[in-house]
Image: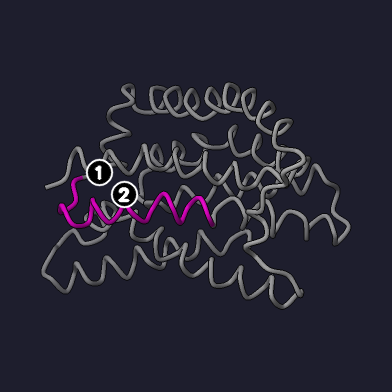
């Protein structure tokens, strides 16, 4: 489960590229990169099905990870206020600073990441991409893979390191462009925030329902950008 999302991102981008190639494009892979939100949507649907199945095999319900523990609501909300401050900085600054370091101008990286899509595709991305990401991404790495690494005897800090690295690493394939600067940018831009998420979820997994909402809102801000540049 640590690598399945990266493999699926790449697989679905390849399938999208094949469709574009059959439609007559001579730059199918480059064009397919613009459709990366759909590669993520398809990947999230596969991973959601896998998570439901794997939890069921262990006699559990996947959806229970989103259950709010009411006796801790006040305590958890106070913690989240501090998390939003630190998480906001770790989510924003590495993105901007790495883009400026690698490209000279953050807008260059943004233009590679957010490319024009047809109106129907942009709207679909806004409707499905943030929702599915909130439901699937963090649970895959932090609530399924990481605890099972620890259960196999792995040191907690190594489990945190692996889970956070692969959470960040998957972004290299969303989208995958054979450009060293862009690959490096996608790898490092999310890494500090991924480490923070891993530590928090290792320490307090009951925060998952709140993290799902925060994550969905973060990805909504990205999805809305597609509305701004849609064809």
Q: Which residue is mark 1?
A: 226
Is residue 27 placed above or below 83 in the rendered structure?
below
Q: Which mark is residue 126?
A: 2
The magenta span reads 116-135
- In terms of sequence position, does the residue under pointer 1 or pointer 2 come before the other? 2
Q: For numbered disc 1, what is the local secondary structure?
A: helix
Label drawn at residue 187: none
Q: Is 182 on the left-hand or right-hand side of 228?
A: right
Q: How many marks?
A: 2
Q: Quadrant of residue 223?
A: top left
The quadrant the N terminus occupies is bottom right
Q: Are marks 1 and 2 in contact (CB under 8 Å)?
A: yes
Classify residue 115 as left or right of residue 99. Answer: left
Q: Where is residue 231? Give x, y as percent.
A: 11, 47
Q: Nearer the viewer, residue 28 or 141?
A: 141
Foreground: 169 or 27? 169
Q: Magenta region's main secondary structure?
A: helix
- Where residue 171 sits: x, y (%)? 47, 47
Q: Residue drawn 18% across and 46% down?
A: 116
Q: Residue furthest bottom?
A: 57
Q: Position of residue 106 (x, y in %)?
A: 33, 26
Above/below status of 85 relative to 167: above
Q: How is the image coloured?
A: one colour
């Amino acid at each position: 489960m640590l690598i399945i999302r990266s493999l699926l991102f790449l697989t679905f981008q390849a399938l999208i590229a094949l469709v574009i190639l059959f439609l007559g494009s001579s730059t199918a892979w480059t064009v397919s990169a613009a459709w990366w939100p759909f590669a993520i949507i398809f990947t999230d649907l596969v991973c959601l099905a896998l998570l439901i199945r794997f939890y069921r095999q262990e006699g559990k319900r996947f959806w229970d990870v989103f259950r709010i523990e009411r006796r801790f609501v006040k305590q958890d909300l106070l913690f989240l206020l501090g998390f939003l401050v630190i998480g906001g900085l770790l989510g924003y600054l590495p993105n901007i600073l790495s883009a400026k370091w690698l490209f000279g101008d953050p807008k260059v990286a943004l233009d590679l990441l957010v490319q024009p899509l047809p109106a129907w595709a942009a709207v679909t991305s806004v409707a499905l991409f943030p929702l599915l990401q909130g439901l699937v991404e963090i649970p895959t790495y932090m609530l399924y893979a990481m605890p099972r690494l620890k259960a196999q005897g792995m040191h907690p800090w190594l489990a945190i390191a692996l889970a956070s690295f692969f959470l960040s690493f998957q972004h290299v394939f969303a989208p995958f462009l054979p450009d060293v600067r862009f690959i490096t940018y996608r790898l490092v831009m999310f890494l500090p925030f991924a480490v923070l998420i891993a530590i928090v979820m290792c320490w307090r997994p009951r925060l998952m329902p709140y993290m799902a909402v925060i994550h969905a809102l973060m990805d909504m801000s990205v999805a809305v950008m597609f509305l701004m540049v849609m064809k």
